[in-house]
Amino acid sequence: MKHFDVIVIGAGAAGMMCAALAGLRGRRVLLIDHAAKLGERIRISGGGRCNFTNRHVSAQNYLSQNPHFCRSALARFSQYDFIAMVERRRIPYHEREHGQLFCDDTAQDIIDMLKDACDQGGVQWAWPCRVEGITHMDSSEGSQFELTTEQAIFRCQSLVIATGGLAVPQIGASPFGYKVAEQFGIQVIPPKPALVPLALAPETLAALKPLAGNTLDAGTHCDGGSFRENVLLTHRGLSGPAILQISSYWQMQEYDSGKKQPVEIDLLPDLDAAGWLAENRNSKMLLANLLAEKLPRKFAHEWCALFGWEKSLNEFSSRELEAVAKTLKDWALMPAGTLGYAKAEVTLGGVDTNALSSKTMEAKTVPGLYFIGEVVDVTGWLGGYNFQWAWSSGWVAGQFA
């Protein structure tokens, strides 16, 4: 039997942050992970350069059934605090569009920084090691958790679950954290793939087949979400950053109303389409050729063919031009689903935040049990926001566990 003050299960971004901070407070910490490679989600992120945070992080960049929950953690350990850690470590980094920050060299720099912080805090490791069971007991020493693992039996006063969600199962994602929550009577918001390409129904794909392969600078809208980035039409459906972003909002509709609405695509986000068409309504130019001034030529022609709008502008009635303008600004496509966790960046849903303290990340009904990172029902936008939630929630739990 080996005793620790704190055991953290999951040596990813949130888990290593939490373990390091708890260790530096003088707590005896054990960090357990079943994976053969340390920090694999960090290593493969951002094309291997780790989009480790975003300059524009705020609570508005996160989705949750309790949208205010993340405010406390984000305020107490902000993007600027993590940037300061990176700068103290002298890790070179750069900024890309929309405030995204990436390592200049490799994501391994972030992993090494966290690993060294754990070592400085005297954190012990059980890795790779599978947890086979968890029991909770009250003793003369207070509330304790006992973990049966393939290496040994461990006991602790504080248990932190940092096991992530279901995204990217090919590198070991599992529902372990949700099962722990359920074991202790804590509600789990049903998980869903998020930041994920959207699939289209076979009949829709057949109609859009000539458009496959086109990339457009477009806007996407759904359920209160709105983004302006690239949209990619594929042989399976819709992808690209603007689609990944809006996919989380499309998925959220099942929680909110149980009924999903289409994703709307604005093909001309910088233009008053109705006014532009009205200015050219007497032209003998084909509509497709006019659209080709703003859209890829092949796409413009195939898109017009899709709707049967293959005639000159002066041949359109006012009502027809209104329909064209509306479709250009709000092209509605109803996804049939997503491409699943294998293609998802993160998981929507998770441990119900109403069951946790926003100030400590501790379960309200189970003293000493904490949940942090992606396993919690807090899901960020694409662009470094989910890593910042991992750092922030891990930091907070590290102060109290």
Image (tube, grey):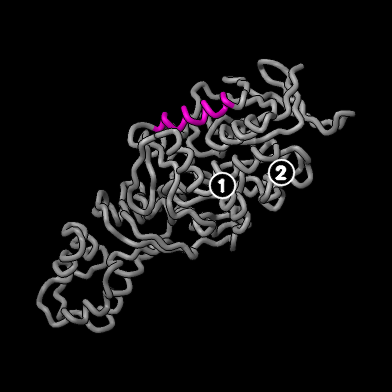
Q: Residue furthest right?
A: 140
By secondary structure, the bulk of the magenta-drawn segment is best described as helix
Q: Is residue 353 magenta?
A: no
- Marks 2/1: CA distance? 17 Å
Residue 56 visible to the viewer = yes
* Residue 263 placement: quadrant: bottom left
Viewer-proximal residue, 205 or 239?
239
Taking the spot 66% from the left edge, 17% from the top edge, the residue there is 150
Q: Residues within 10 Å of mark 1 (few under 14, many from 20)?
A: some
* Position of the N terminus by quadrant: top right
Give left or right: position of 150 versus 198.
right
Q: Which residue is mark 1?
A: 77
Viewer-proximal residue, 244 or 76?
76
Q: Measured from the top left, where is residue 129 in percent x and y?
A: 61, 20
- Say the numbered circle drawn on residue 362: 2
Task: Name the kind of residue labelled 2 in the image.
Answer: Glu
Give left or right: position of 318 versus 137.
left
Viewer-proximal residue, 180 or 160?
160
Taking the spot 57% from the left edge, 20% from the top edge, the residue there is 128
Task: Name the kind of residue labelled 1 in the image.
Answer: Phe
Taking the spot 28% from the left edge, 58% from the top edge, the residue there is 217
Q: Measured from the top left, where is residue 15 in percent x and y?
A: 59, 34
* Residue 316 placement: quadrant: bottom left
Give left or right: position of 295 versus 86.
left
- Say the numbered circle drawn on residue 267: none
Relative to residue 245, is residue 321 depicted above or below? below
Q: Measured from the top left, where is residue 52 in percent x and y?
A: 44, 41
Q: Earlier in the sequence, mark 2 or mark 1?
A: 1
Residue 375 visible to the viewer = no
Bounds of the magenta segment: 107-120
SS category of the residue bearing label 1: loop
